[in-house]
Amino acid sequence: MGIKIIKREGGSFKDRIYLPAILSGMKVTFSHFFKNLKDTSNIKTLNYPEEMPQDITSRYRGVHLLTKREDGSERCVACFMCATACPAECIFIEAEERTDGVDEKRPKIFTIDLLECVFCGGCVEACPCDAIRMDSGIFSFVAQKREDFLLTKERLLSHQSMKDKEC
Ligand code: SF4
Ligand code: SF4
């Protein structure tokens, strides 16, 4: 069996001492360092969480919210489209009959398990009523207990859309 010998690249003395490559890397690092030292307006690093980012757009996929109708009731008609589309199977809905004549059904229970959610936005895409959104602008969600990551219907309805906040 013939053995094919491949010539190794980078075997020169210059490559083996690494110094030219290190110096070229440091040149880039220091050029950015001195540029940012002179003009700090381009530095994007924030002293988080003391400093919060102010430039979150409404396209950012944050924590979910359930939208409301003009009368303050939930827009959701408990059609289960979002739960069906959810790849993480983390939306739990229990429907009940709606007796006020606005619609046939509404969710009695609507819970999202944020620990399982992968923030794909599939539920928002699947909803035919614009009842679920992810434009709350809430990107930091911390809790000490597992149960606190279960977003109930009441909590989802209490989150405000960034579009409404801008108004
Ligand atoms: S964002 Fe994706 S994973 Fe999270 S609840 Fe919606 S569909 Fe499920
Ligand atoms: S949020 Fe939208 S898709 Fe999900 S059950 Fe309600 S109406 Fe249907």
Image (tube, rainbow, N blue to C red):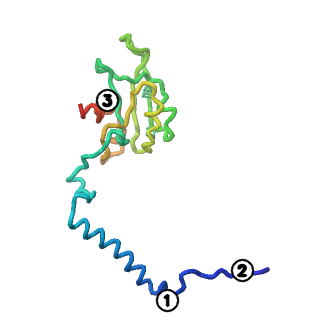
Q: Position of residue 64 (x, y in %)?
A: 36, 36
Counting every numbered tag in the picture gives: 3
Give the residue at the far top of this rendering.
Answer: 101
Q: Position of residue 146 (x, y in %)?
A: 36, 45
Location of residue 103 by image quarter: top left
Give the residue at the far right of this rendering.
Answer: 1
Q: CA distance from mark 1 to mark 2?
A: 25 Å
Q: Amino acid at mark 3?
A: Leu
Q: Dividing the image into 4 quarters, which one contains the C terminus?
A: top left
Location of residue 101 by image quarter: top left
Badge 1 or badge 3: first in the primary sequence: 1
Q: Which mark is residue 13?
A: 1
Q: Amino acid at mark 1?
A: Phe
Q: CA distance from mark 1 to mark 3?
A: 67 Å
> Circle 3 sits on which residue?
157
Q: Amino acid at mark 2?
A: Lys
Badge 1: few (under 14), some or many (20 or more) residues near its Cα, within 10 Å? few
Residue at horizontal 38 percent and vertical 75 percent from the top: 25
Q: CA distance from mark 3 to mark 2?
A: 67 Å
Which-is-in-front pick, marks 1 and 2?
1
> Circle 2 sits on which residue?
4
Residue at horizontal 40 percent and vertical 45 percent from the top: 115
